[in-house]
Amino acid sequence: MKKIFLYIIAFVGVCFFIPFIFTNKFETKTVGVGVESPPITDNDIPYDYRDYNKIKLLHTKTNQIEEINLDEYLYGVVSSEMPATFEQQALNAQAVVARTYTIYTINHNNSKHGDAQICDNSSCCQAWITKEDRFARWEESLRQSNWEKIVTAVDSTKGKIITYKGEPIDAFFHSNSGGTTEMPINVWGGSGFEYLQSVTTAGEEAYTQYASELELSKQELEKKVKEKYNDFNINWSEENCLQILEYTESGRVKTFKVGNKNLSGVEARTIFGLRSTNFEFKIDGENIKFNVKGYGHRSWNEPNRSRRNGKTR
């Protein structure tokens, strides 16, 4: 009986000490936002959020530079880039994207705006609006609740950014993709971004801006192209005077023949004022009708302008 009791004591001791022996002790690290993060890995955020408490914002209309708190800046960005009527989680996601884009821009475009780090022009950087101007555009009964959602989106994601291989990404975004996103190389050329690939996005058909139509007269189309190309000409009697010559992997127009000019899909979108390069067309008498899917990035405050000189983001 005594031996059995000793065996039991030994068994309990082994069961108690084995987990203790094989348990690693990890240190936690504060990432500059006042909270403790999980154990450190190779994918940890390589920046201290406290380094970006203040940023230098260029107001393009006045050419004045304002030093502004980063979170206050993000309130203005989120309230410009996405309607406050959207779901809270969508606003939260927009806040993370806006913060990521801001950090990336500060680190990669230091001389672009002189002494400023980023500007308030959506054609160049991100849309931005003051709280006062934002309130003026909202119905009075919705102002406080809308602003609370914007503040919650920024504050609840404080310090969070999107990284790839330990570095902040260049965070492109758009209104809706028309069912499939596009690779940046097909928009701006270059070598593209390894972390941004074409993917399907199911369920977008329900968006109010999923599809659009644009109708131009032949004369209007000619005028728009001639504004950029003085030597442009077109013979409307030719069967293929307008023709889509090539598509991208995502099904968007890559090359669009217009008379004696071969335009890139992005260029055609800009010249004709289309919402996306995912378009079809038909000649109907004296008019050309474009049917478009998706909506590349547009500022909610400046609906006729898009970031990076008309190129979808």
Image (cartoon, rainbow, N blue to C red):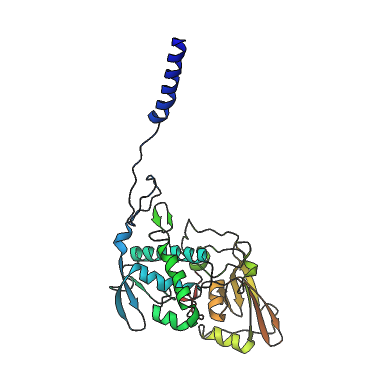
| Residue drawn at point x = 33 percent, y = 84 percent | 62
| Residue drawn at point x = 47 percent, y = 64 percent | 92
Name the foreground residue: 57 vs 192. Answer: 57
Q: Quadrant of residue 167?
A: bottom left
Q: Is residue 107 above or below residue 274?
A: above
Residue 233 horizontal/vertical position (percent): 59, 85
Residue 159 horizontal/vertical position (percent): 38, 59
Name the foreground residue: 262 vs 28. Answer: 28
Residue 23 horizontal/vertical position (percent): 40, 33
Any part of residue 125 in sight: no
Tally of marks: 0
What residue occupies the far front of the structure in this picture? 1
Q: Quadrant of residue 76?
A: bottom left
Any part of residue 287 in sight: yes
Name the foreground residue: 131 vs 204. Answer: 131
| Residue drawn at point x = 42 percent, y = 14 percent | 6
Residue 35 horizontal/vertical position (percent): 35, 53
Side of 262 relative to 70 (left or right): right
Q: Quadrant of residue 274?
A: bottom right
What residue occupies the far bottom of the structure in this picture? 219
